[in-house]
Image (cartoon, rainbow, N blue to C red):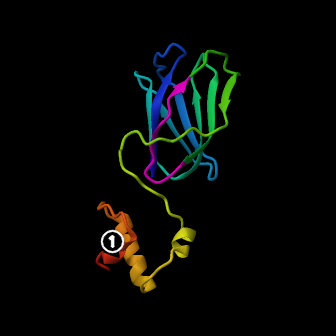
Amino acid sequence: MAQVSGSVLDPTGKAIVGAQVTMTDTEKGQVRTAVSDSAGSYTLPSLPVGPYRLEVKAPGFKDYVQSGLVLQVGNNIQINVAMQVGSVSERVEVNAATNQVETRENSISVVIDAQRISEFPWQADKVTARRTFWMAATTRTPCRTLTCLFRSPTL
């Protein structure tokens, strides 16, 4: 799961209250919504991983659309939106993904897909090695070398 939060601001930097913020999973079509509060802040928690499009709408402002967002496990990113004054029929669209920087936690994580795991050069019994790798990957104790993976207790 991931989380997206941020602020919705007008061109002068003041909060926009009541802006409709929508995150749409572009593969599955699932939609999550939030409304900006009195500080212009919004939060969309517990988003499944995958590609998304962010849309923000507020009366008296051009619609804002940002596509190309890809959420990974544990992402907790902040996207601040600067709305532009305009009519309801006008739209600002951003098609490039921004750098998604973790702003709330100072940990390092990596998403490893099934293909990379299957290509990993296992040195010991494959079942034991995979259990050990899984345990090392899911514990909070840092493991900086492959050697420590194989010294960990097995299941």
Residue depicted at x 43% and y 77%: 130
Direction right: furthest residue: 89
Counting every numbered tag in the picture gives 1
What amino acid is at disc 1?
Answer: Cys
x%, y% of residue 87?
67, 16
Left of 11 or right of it: where is 106? left
Q: Which residues are magenta?
A: 71-82
Residue depicted at x 39% and y 77%: 131
Question: In which image quadrant can residue 147 be found?
Answer: bottom left
x%, y% of residue 125?
42, 86
Could you say which is closer to the camera, residue 2 or residue 152?
152
x%, y% of residue 63?
63, 26
Residue 25 lies, with reference to residue 140, above or below; the image says above
Question: In which image quadrant can residue 66 be found?
Answer: top right
Q: Few, some or many C-alpha atoms within 10 Å of disc 1 (few <14, some 14-19, many ≥20)? A: few
Residue on which disc 1 sits? 148
Which quarter of the image is occupied by the C terminus?
A: bottom left
Residue depicted at x 48% and y 34%: 34
Residue 128 lies, with reference to residue 147, above or below; the image says below
x%, y% of residue 138?
36, 65
